[in-house]
Image (tube, rainbow, N blue to C red):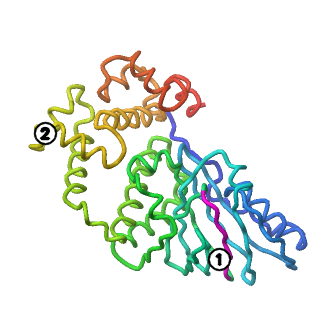
Amino acid sequence: MFESMAIVDGWKNSSVWSTELLPSGKQFERWCEFVNEAHLHWSIERGTYDNFPAFIREGRFGDFRMANLTTAPRSSVRGTRGQPEIAHDSDALYNFLYIAEGSERLIIDGKDVDLVPGNIVLWDSARPMIFITGEGLHQITLAITHERLHRIFPNAEQFVGMKISCSSGLNRLFADHLLALDQQFGDLTSEQAWAVLDTTTNLAVSAFESECGSYRNARVSGLLCEIRNYIEKNIEDCDLSISNIAEHHNISVRHLHRLFHEIDISASGYITWRRLERCKQDLSSRTRGRETITDIAFRWGFSDSGTFSKIFRREYGVSPREFRATVQE
């Protein structure tokens, strides 16, 4: 039996990134370096502080990153992210930023976004931005690549700069989930992490869409959600097809294609993507280490291992065998 392994070593050990053991005069300078190392690149105005006790905890997994960041209790830091800083980062990321303590002001597209505890805002690493921290800031950020988020949230860019309050309901559920994820993420196995992050992404999208009051396509969105749930329940069936999905929901194949056009993916492309994600979870699992890649591919609805390997490489840039070796080494 294979032992489960944490996906991020030392995730809970905030002292790894703490400035408190450094000489007072070096603390702020090192914190600025931490930000650029762990949380994208910024041009940060260098202030003068006798001391700057703060930390950053950062972890990455697949298309996701999380960063837990604090500033010194009595400080105000200003950072700018323009085209030179954007060019330093290879990944374009959407960032769900949650304020746990303190305050912060963001300037996005020339508009001020004032944040207080309990607020979440969406910002885009590919767009210029300015941040100005209030005293005693503590923020937690979930970052997701553009490519992954666009698959289920194709109009995400329209929500950039929008803040929501997490005092109750679905928004509170998302905030609580985000806080729990930050604390427990390092205890998850790779297999668990894929499933949890899938749920996290769906919660984030639901919270923002609900807050925005985007009900103009409520019937369409509801039917699409029902169809996607049906696909999830039947994803192992190699006979799952566009025609039988349409027939099950009493709609035409043409209408089914129109529904998936709303999220910028074809219906068949969506089914393939969900099957690949399930295979990816199993390939990450040490408990399934004795299973062949063909067994895993067949389990999730692929009928030909050669075709599966080609599709997997095209999607993720490596073969299934190379991916398994990397995540289980």
Relative to 216, does residue 241 appear above or below in the rendering? Answer: above
Q: Select label 1 or label 2 by which is in front.
A: 2
Of residues 98 and 290, the one drawn nearer to the viewer in this rendering:
98
Residue in the picture at 11% in, 40% down? 248
Amino acid at pointer 1: Leu
| Residue 158 appears left or right of 299 | right
Tell me if label 1 and label 2 are in contact, CB under 8 Å. no
Q: Name the residue that disc number 1 marks.
A: 137
For the residues labelled 1 and 2, the Cα–Cα distance comes to 53 Å
Look at the image and give the residue range highlighted in magenta. Answer: 127-134
Does the magenta portion include 112? no
Residue 67 % position (x, y): 61, 60
Q: Name the residue that disc number 2 marks.
A: 252
Q: Earlier in the sequence, mark 1 or mark 2?
A: 1
Amino acid at pointer 2: Ser
Of residues 265 and 313, the one drawn nearer to the viewer in this rendering:
265
Residue in the picture at 31% in, 49% down? 262
Residue 242 % position (x, y): 21, 33
